[in-house]
Amino acid sequence: MKQDKSWLITTEVLSRYLLKQGVKPTSALLSFQENYSGLILTIQNNKGATFKANLFSSLDIVFNRDEDVSKVGGRYIFECGEHSTAQFNFYITDKGEVCT
């Protein structure tokens, strides 16, 4: 397990950024960012089995880039990770539900 430090952001900075994006900074989003963003998980000796958890990058926040925000079923959803070989995306809702 490794962690890409470019995904580490304080909750105060992230809260301000989300408000600028028109999204309520929920405890689920703040918690995922703080605890999982930037983690790179790889099965030993199998680089093809790597999962990268990421939500909001520090560069997106510094440059105030617009987030690709979608709303489905009354919930905001955000891409939150990628797998090196999976052919689908991972998402998290503003309520903390992870889905594909």
Image (cartoon, rainbow, N blue to C red):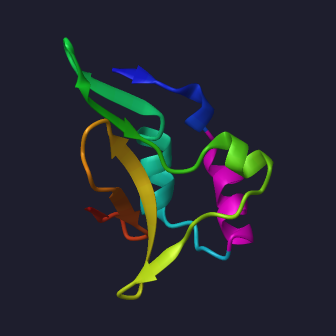
Residue located at (80% from left, 50% from top): 63
Residue 92 in which image quadrant = bottom left
Instruction: Check the image and name the residue furthest to the top.
Output: 45
Residue at the extreme right of the image, as rendered: 63
Quadrant where the N terminus sits is top left
* Image: 54 above or below 67: above
**Is 16 located above or below residue 61 in the figure?**
below
Q: Note whether 79 is above or below 5 in the view shown.
A: below
Pick the residue in front: 39 or 12.
Answer: 39
Residue 30, position in %: x, y? 51, 54
Q: Residue at x 57, y 37 (%)?
A: 7
Residue 6: horizontal and vertical position, in percent? 61, 32
Position of residue 23 measured from the top left corner of the image (x, y, whole percent): 60, 73
Label total for image: 0
Magenta stretch, overall SS: helix
Left or right of 48 on screen, residue 76: right
Dividing the image into 4 quarters, which one contains the C terminus?
A: bottom left
In the image: residue 90, left or right of residue 31: left
- What residue is shown at x 68% (from left), y 52% (from top)? 12
Q: Which residue is drawn at 72% across and 50% down?
A: 61
Give the residues drawn in magenta, as a range: 9-21
Q: Where is residue 60 in the image (x, y as percent from the top left)?
A: 69, 49
Q: Is residue 66 magenta?
A: no
